[in-house]
Image (cartoon, grey):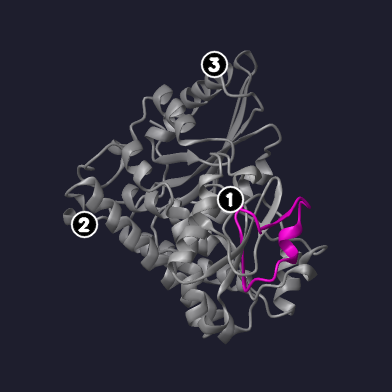
Amino acid sequence: MKIRVFVDNDEADLHAFVIVDSLAQGRAMGGTRMTPGVTPDEVAELARKMTMKLALAGLDIGGAKAGIVCGLPLGPERDRVLAEFGKAVSPLLHGGLYLGGDQGVSHRDRDVFFDAAGFDATLATDSTGLPCSWPELWKKCSDVTGFGVCEGIDQGVDTLGIRGECRTVAIQGFGCVGSAVAAGLSARGFTVVAVADREGTVSHPDGLPLEALFAATDSAGTIDRGRLPEGLTLDPTPDAWLDVDADVLVLAAGGDAITEANADRVRARIVAEGGNCTCTPGAQRALAARGVKVLPDIVVNTGGAAVTALLLTGEAPAEAMADADTLTAWLYREVGRRIRRSTDRLLEFAESSGLQLMDAAAELADRRLAERETAGTAGGRTTALSLV
């Protein structure tokens, strides 16, 4: 079942849309994208990927996504648009749809439209008695998406049998996800040799001083070059990260970072999609032809979605609800377990089937969705999204 809802309120300057790609037990979830050029087709593709992402992680909830066409800067007018959006989609939120943050929508922005909708995410979960508020829990889980990317890469090198040959990392994007990946992979024994932000690429073949980098990076993921130690290579060329010698390349910035036009410059053996749609289909084919393994976003960029889904569907055991720290620790363990399992299954299935990794992931997701549909039909479960 697919649902498309369009919201147009000229008086409030609100033009938005919600696209539900699939439902499981009457529920769906996904992020809200707020940019001047966001389109229904773009959101529909992201909603489909959310369906696949959740299915591959073994989470019984459907995929959705929302778009708000808006380029207003932070301030009262932008908040007014968010509040109007919340009022408009209130029946959906109260009827089984969860909408979180995405490009252009922070946790704080999400709270603005939640408040306007009278929606309490804590009460929307199937978990009995969360030990803290929803915002408090998310502060503790702020780096879970980057953590999940690290788990996928770590499992990937083991499944492929190349741990001893795959040690250096370059990261494109140094925001919340990219910086968490840098810290996480370093803790797992990898050496981060390059990071890129909007000002270019910072690199050193023997490894970067991560603590100095973190201290020099602002909340938007931009590194102050003037605060870095001497001896590092600072290249302002926008795509210099492509030419860095590294075994692993993590894409943690915008979409379509690697295309058919630049795929030949990738030197890594593994590319991990830490952001959404970071490799075009043509780039994935070109990389696969060279033997480069692309760990797709629908497998490794699952951490944040998995935490939400685990709570919305009541997967956390009673003992995990003892306090906020206990719940957080359980969520990280469970996210890591599911991503490692998905990565291992994907790589083994791709090897046995001869499929490109993204095609193999799509096939596995379709199989999981078919199993879920069969189980839902046999169990007599509802698949309706309530609008009351």
Q: Which residue is mark 3?
A: 76
Q: Residue at x 40, y 46 (%)?
A: 27
Label 3 element class? helix
Q: Nearer the viewer, residue 131 or 268?
A: 268
Q: Which residue is mark 1?
A: 174
Which callout, 2 or 1, points to the residue nearer the camera?
1
Asked if residue 37 lies in the magenta stretch, the reply is no
Camera-nearest residue between 19 and 163: 163
Q: Is residue 152 left or right of residue 313?
A: right
Q: In this image, 337 relative to 162: left or right?
A: left
Query: Which x, y percent locates residue 257?
Result: 71, 56
Depth check, mark 1 against mark 3: the one in front is 1
Image position of 189 with respect to 62: above or below? below
Q: Which residues are magenta?
A: 229-252
Whether residue 20 is situated above or below residue 49 in the rendered picture: above
Q: What distance separates the C-alpha of mark 2 from that of mark 1? A: 34 Å
Could you tell me which residue is drawn at 54 percent across and 35 percent down?
Answer: 105
| Number of numbered discs visible in the structure rendering | 3
Task: Give the SS element for disc 2.
Answer: loop
Residue at 58 percent across and 61 percent down: it is 208
Q: Does residue 266 lie above or below 238 as drawn? A: below
- Dot 1 amino acid type: Phe
Distance between the alpha carbons at the discs numbered 3 and 2: 41 Å
Kind of residue indicated by mark 2 = Pro
Answer whether residue 250 is magenta in the image. yes
How packed is label 2: few (under 14 Cα within 10 Å), some, or many (20 or more)?
A: few
Numbered mark located on residue 317 in the image? 2
Residue 34 seen anywhere in this rendered image of the structure: yes
